[in-house]
Image: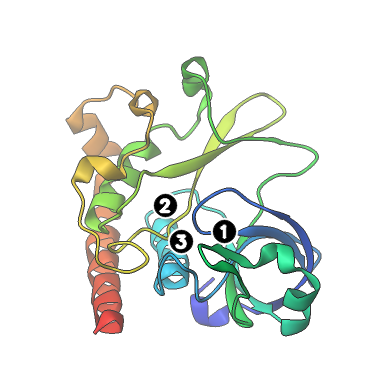
Amino acid sequence: MPFCEKRTTVVTQFVRRLRGGAQSILAQAGDGLFYVVKFAGNPQGENLLFNESAGAELYRACGLNTPSWKPLLLTDAFLDRNPQCWFQTETGLVKPTAGLCFGSSFLGDESTRLFEILPEGSFNRIRNQVSFWLAWLVDICAEHADNRQALFLEDARRRLDAYFVDQGHLFGGPKGNRRVHFVASRYLDFRVYPNISSTHLLDRIYPQHIFWISRETWALSILTRSGRE
């Protein structure tokens, strides 16, 4: 669904804080679904929410698994009721700004198991393992300034699907000023990348996605640089 067609839903119930520098929370919205929520005015940088939303659309356009997302509405009443979700800073708690925020659909439910880390012996159960190579290419083109993050969803037959998450450090990071070596944007455990010839890799994924990668990353880089200026 194009960004302009996404409908806003109000955040209604705080569940818990989540790990990570973005200080996101797990919350339920008015549509009854659960979301990983990231707030505007994030101490990491003003571009965080743009990077998350634009990065999710870029990944989806390239045929990569990423959770669906939507803009969520954060009210002052919700923030006042739940000081647990305020930003933790060196000078104390800081109340996030009410208004639109980023909501990524929570992947876990009662019928599936969700993993953040896998032992090496489970890598061969990942059905879209080759996608890690394409994700790395996208991250290099989009100037991803952090390690690639992924979650692994297990079905009833113990098959795993990787979902690529946390796009906030794309386009030079939340402040748009980071330039790192291309190795910095790969998944931390390099053993997840399957052994595959470059010719086979190009035949399988590059021809159908390279146009999207070049066009979308160029357009998004222009937007982020315009915002910084």
Tell me if mark 2 has few (under 14), some (14-19) or many (20+) residues whose alpha carbon lies within 10 angstroms of its own: some
3 or 1: tag closer to the N-terminus: 1
* Residue drawn at point x = 76 percent, y = 77 percent: 80
Disc sitting over residue 56 in the figure:
3
Q: Secondary structure at mark 1?
A: loop
* Residue drawn at point x = 37 percent, y = 58 percent: 169
1 or 2: tag closer to the N-terminus: 1
Q: Amino acid at mark 2?
A: Gly
Which of the two discs, 1 and 2, sits closer to the camera? 1
Q: Is residue 114 above or below residue 18?
A: above
Q: Secondary structure at mark 2?
A: loop
Is the image coloured rainbow, by chain, by secondary structure, or in one colour?
A: rainbow
* Residue drawn at point x = 63 percent, y = 51 percent: 18
Structural distance between the alpha carbons of marks 2 and 3? 11 Å
Residue 109 seen anywhere in this rendered image of the structure: yes
Disc sitting over residue 69 in the figure:
none
Locate residue 94, reporting x and y percent: 59, 72
